[in-house]
Image (cartoon, helix red, strand yellow):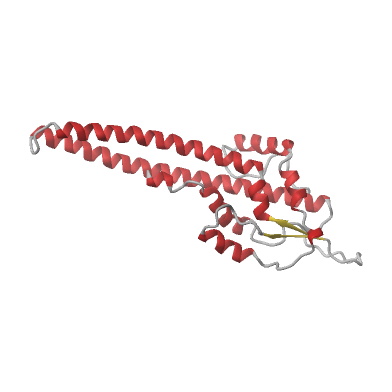
Amino acid sequence: MDNVDSTRRDLLSLGAIGAGAALGAAILAPAAARADNATGLKIGLIDIGVIFKKYHRKDDLEKEINARKDGYEKQQLDQQKTLDGLMTAMSTIKEGSDLWRQKRKEYNLQMSQMKVIREGWKEELQIQIENLTLMILNEIENRVQKYGQDNKYDLIVKIDSQGWGDERFQERIFRAQVSAILYFRPELNVTDAVLAMLNDPAWIKICQDNALKNNNQPAPPNGAQPPK
């Protein structure tokens, strides 16, 4: 049970770690300076922690992971019942007898098989969590780039004011790494605008269709590429 439970709510934690790589560069929109614009660069800012928390697709994918985990736990309970049955049978047989030794071999074999199966479940869940986290980050980056290019931003940087769910050690480390901006004017914050684009039902449908087509493997949403 512990092996499967260890993956509970890891989407948020992996999202925090994975975001450092997927969105590691502070520049998410083209950073070409406007030589012909006397006002200088047009700069925006997004709060990546808020976006990750409030993106509706993240909640849906967490439910998908939890459903798979619950299925594994049900199978694990069934396996445990088999072990309990073997143990009960052994208790009714004279210890050291041929039949008792045969039941003990069956019990040990079942225990070994269960260990292998549980390790496989843990690996499968980990892979799914990583894939779905990368998928979310790809979708977020797509909409940030789209917003930046549509609104002629030269630069969009990120902060993380909220964290990524429960403040665990890995998340604190991540936040310390990305907290490079200590002050900004509130009007530079375009988080709500980008979040509105992400939670647009049309965009959600595109992402869902793309995930179905690619079997939940990270890939840019079809038909929704950022403008070149």
**Image quadrant in which the N terminus is located:** top left
Query: Is 27 positioned to the left or the right of 38 in the image?
Result: left
**Whether residue 63 is situated above or below residue 144 in the rendered picture:** above
Q: Quadrant of residue 132?
A: top right
Tell me how many marks there are.
0
Q: Position of residue 72 (x, y in %)?
A: 42, 37
Q: Position of residue 193 (x, y in %)?
A: 77, 49
Give the residue displayed 70% in from the left and 56% down from the top: 47
**Whether residue 120 is situated above or below residue 41 in the rendered picture:** above
Work out whether residue 19 can be spotted: yes
Viewer-proximal residue, 180 or 117?
180
Viewer-proximal residue, 100 or 135?
100
Give the residue displayed 39% in from the left and 46% down from the top: 3
Q: Position of residue 177 (x, y in %)?
A: 60, 65
Q: Quadrant of residue 48?
A: bottom right
Query: Is 153 positioned to the left or the right of 3 in the image?
Result: right
Viewer-proximal residue, 70 or 222?
70
**Whether residue 48 is situated above or below residue 220 in the rendered picture:** below
Work out whether residue 228 can be spotted: no
